[in-house]
Amino acid sequence: MSGHDEKPQRSRQLPLAFPEATLTLDQLPVTAANRTAIAVLKRWPDWRTPSLAVVGAPKSGLTTAAKAWVAHADGELIEAKAFDRLSHKKIEALAARPVAIDLGEAVKNEDNLLSIINLSARAGGSVLVTGHVSPARWRVRLRDLESRLKSMTLVELGPPDDEMVKIRLRAAMKRRYLKLPDDVEAYVLTRIERNYPAIETFVENLHEMADGREITVPLARDVMDAQGGTRALFEDGED
C-alpha cells in the first residue's frame, strides 16, 4: 500500500502541564464554602492564637490556601516529610517567622511539631497547619503536643456549594484547555456530586473521552454515567 492510500491518523490532544501561579488571598474564589476561613487568613497577624489549623476534604484547596497565606505573610511553606527532617536549629530559625505546614496530620516528628508551636508562641511567630481532620483528632503520643493541638484556632474549607462547584468546574476545564458550552455546564451543575474529587474526576474523564471532539450533553451524560455517583435531582425528601 502506498503512502497515498494510508488513512490519516487522528492526532490526540496531549495534555500540557504548566506551573500554576500562586494566587493571593484576594484572588482566591470566595463563597459560603470558604468565606470564614479566607477571612481569618486575611486577618493575620491579628489571630486569636499564634497557631491556626485549616481543615478540609481532599481537593478542597488546602495547599492553595496555605500558599496564598504564606505569600500574604511573607512566610514559608513546608511539606510534612520535609518538616520531619528539620534540625532543631532550623526550627529555632523558623520560629520567629510565619510558617505553614502542609498536611500537618502527616507529620511523624512530633518533637519538631511541638517545638515549632512552642517556640513560635514565644518568639512572636505564627504557625498554620492544614489537614483533612481537626488537629484535636490527630493521634499523637506527646501529651503536651496533644494539648497544643486542641487549643489551636480551627477554621474549615467546607463542602462546595453551588457557586463553588461552578467555579471549580470552570477552573478544571480551563487547566485542560477545554471549553464547556453553556448547555453542557447547566446539565452538569444540576447533576454532579457536591464534593471536590467528583468535580476533578469528571473533568479528567471528560478530557479523556472527548479526545478532540466537541463537548455535548450526551458526551457529558456518558462521562457521568461511567463515573457514577451523580447528584439526585430532587433532595431534602421531595417526592
Image (cartoon, grey):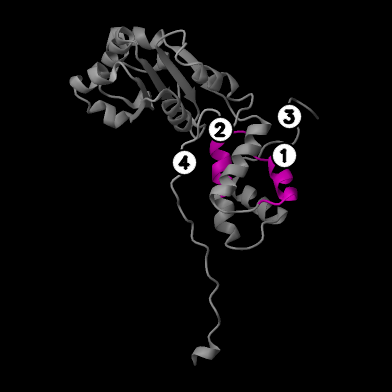
Three-letter code for the amino acid on which mark 2 is drawn:
Gln
From mark 1 to mark 4, how far is it between C-alphas? 31 Å
Q: Identify the residue position indicated by label 4 in the image.
A: 21
Tell whether position 195 is magenta.
yes
Main SS class of the magenta portion in the image? helix
Q: Which mark is residue 235?
A: 3
Quadrant of residue 45 within the rendered picture:
top left
Which segment did they paint magenta? 180-203
Nearer to us in this view, 15 or 27: 27
SS at mark 3 in the image: loop
| Rendered image quadrant of residue 101 | top left
Please tell me which of labels 1 and 4 falls first in the chain.
Answer: 4
Which residue is depicted at the point 47% across and 33% down?
64
Residue occupying image coordinates x 79% and y 28%: 238
Identity, as a three-letter code, of the amino acid under mark 3: Glu
Q: Nearer the viewer, residue 230 or 87?
A: 87
- Spatial CA span between label 2 and label 4: 11 Å
* Residue behind mark 1: 190
Of label 2 and label 1, which has the lower sequence position? 2
